[in-house]
């Protein structure tokens, strides 16, 4: 399907609470809404949302956004992914199907999601609202502090809740091994990106029975094959915002499963447009994994369905089903 026009609109949206990660503390999310039109006048939407410290810089993406006619062939993966997502939105609209069903006829109306929490109080609140899995950012503080906080969370929520950790590659191999050994008795579901690099991740995985999840280090079939060869991961976390759009990410998810690894879909904490693509993708996956699809922002460009009892529904209309307006 050929596009007839393309437009971009920048956004800067506040997080509900400042997000503390190994890469720093963030109060806002910045990116661009990409809108493409086809010859029939339909509009498809994507979200270009680089993440500081991972992939392209904001300034580099900003310079590419000035060259609208070159976006589809941009060398930057975030730009290409946004355009590909918008084109998938158009294709699903033309087919008269929600994007999830365009990806898979067996798509479910809703997907399970974990909640991103920071302490025992927020973890208990999440489980009381129906979440059966929670995720905690670690590696921004010393290992001993993280271990104490995670232990307090586990004790507060009990043993039935899935507890996931995300270090964003912020630990050294030695620190990761120390942390996982100290938390070995806490029934951790998995630790996402404990270190940077598949070789380092393989060394960590060899020392623990806790599952290891790769995120930033798996961006293609080639990197997936290398992770399998190295036995570096048990789980692969996929973000359509960085992996060539929803269609390419759906195909990569199939390859991950065929390699014997588990799949988790998350968004990149971007606007409702990007998060809606992740929701549709999660709903299209065959095994209904618990993904990462919650609302991290206090303001947004559109409203998505709320999370109810730990599940979020995709929009029912054709395509993405989300039309961005002003900040809401």
Image (cartoon, rainbow, N blue to C red):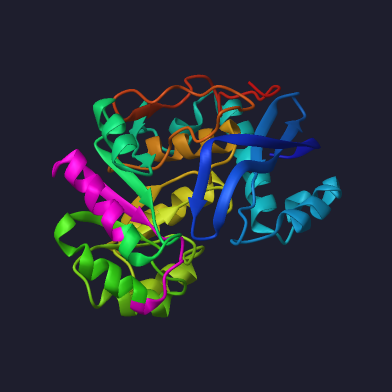
> In the image, 23: left or right of 326?
left
Q: Is residue 169 magenta?
A: yes
Residue at position x 29%, y 25% from top? 129
Q: Quadrant of residue 260?
A: bottom left
- Where's residue 128, x and y in %? 25, 27
Q: Quadrant of the C terminus?
A: top right
Residue 224, percent across and down?
42, 68
Residue 231 appears in the picture as rendered: no
Q: Position of residue 300 (x, y in %)?
A: 61, 28
Depth check: 203 or 93 in front? 203
Is residue 33 depicted above or below 178 in this figure? above
Q: Classify 37 as above or below 286.
A: above
* x 34%, y 46%: residue: 135
**What is the total number of numbered labels drawn onto the structure image?**
0
- State the residue at coordinates (68%, 43%): 31
Q: Is residue 227 visible?
A: yes
Q: Is residue 155 magenta?
A: yes
Q: Residue at x 60, y 42 (%)?
A: 27
On the image, which quarter does residue 13 sit in?
top right
Q: Which of the pair 254/192 is nearer the observer?
A: 192
Magenta segment boundaries in residue numbering: 147-174
For the residue pair 276 and 303, the one nearer the viewer reads as: 303
Above or below residue 63? Residue 14 is above
Q: Quadrant of the N terminus?
A: top right
Q: Horizontally, is 141 left or right of 46 in the view?
A: left
């Amino acid at each position: 399907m050929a596009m007839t026009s393309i437009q971009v609109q920048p956004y800067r949206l506040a997080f509900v609470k400042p997000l503390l990660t190994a890469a720093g503390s963030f109060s806002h999310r910045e990116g661009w809404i990409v809108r493409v039109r086809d010859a029939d006048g339909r509009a498809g939407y994507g979200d270009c949302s680089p993440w500081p410290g991972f992939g392209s810089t904001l300034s580099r993406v900003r310079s590419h956004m000035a060259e609208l006619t070159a976006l589809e062939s941009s060398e930057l993966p975030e730009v290409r992914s946004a355009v590909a997502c918008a084109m998938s939105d158009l294709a699903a609209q033309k087919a008269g199907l929600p994007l999830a069903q365009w990806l898979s006829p067996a798509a479910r109306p809703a997907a399970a999601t974990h909640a991103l929490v920071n302490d025992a109080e927020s973890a208990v609140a999440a489980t009381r609202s129906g979440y059966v899995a929670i995720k905690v950012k670690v590696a921004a503080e010393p290992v001993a502090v993280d271990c104490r906080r995670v232990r307090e969370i586990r004790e507060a929520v009990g043993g039935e809740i899935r507890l996931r950790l995300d270090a964003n590659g912020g630990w050294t191999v030695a620190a990761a091994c120390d942390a996982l050994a100290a938390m070995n008795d806490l029934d951790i579901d998995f630790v996402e990106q404990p270190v940077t690099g598949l070789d380092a991740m393989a060394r960590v995985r060899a020392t623990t029975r806790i599952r290891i999840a790769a995120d930033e280090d798996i961006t293609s079939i080639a990197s997936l094959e290398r992770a399998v060869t190295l036995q570096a991961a048990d789980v692969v976390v996929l973000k359509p915002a960085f992996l060539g759009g929803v269609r390419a990410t759906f195909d990569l998810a199939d390859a991950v499963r065929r390699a014997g690894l588990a799949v988790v879909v998350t968004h990149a904490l971007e606007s409702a447009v990007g998060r809606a693509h992740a929701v549709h993708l999660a709903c299209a996956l065959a095994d209904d994994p618990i993904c990462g699809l919650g609302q991290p922002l206090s303001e947004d460009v559109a409203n998505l369905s709320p999370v109810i009892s730990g599940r979020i529904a995709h929009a029912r209309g054709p395509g993405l089903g989300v039309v961005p307006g002003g900040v809401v």
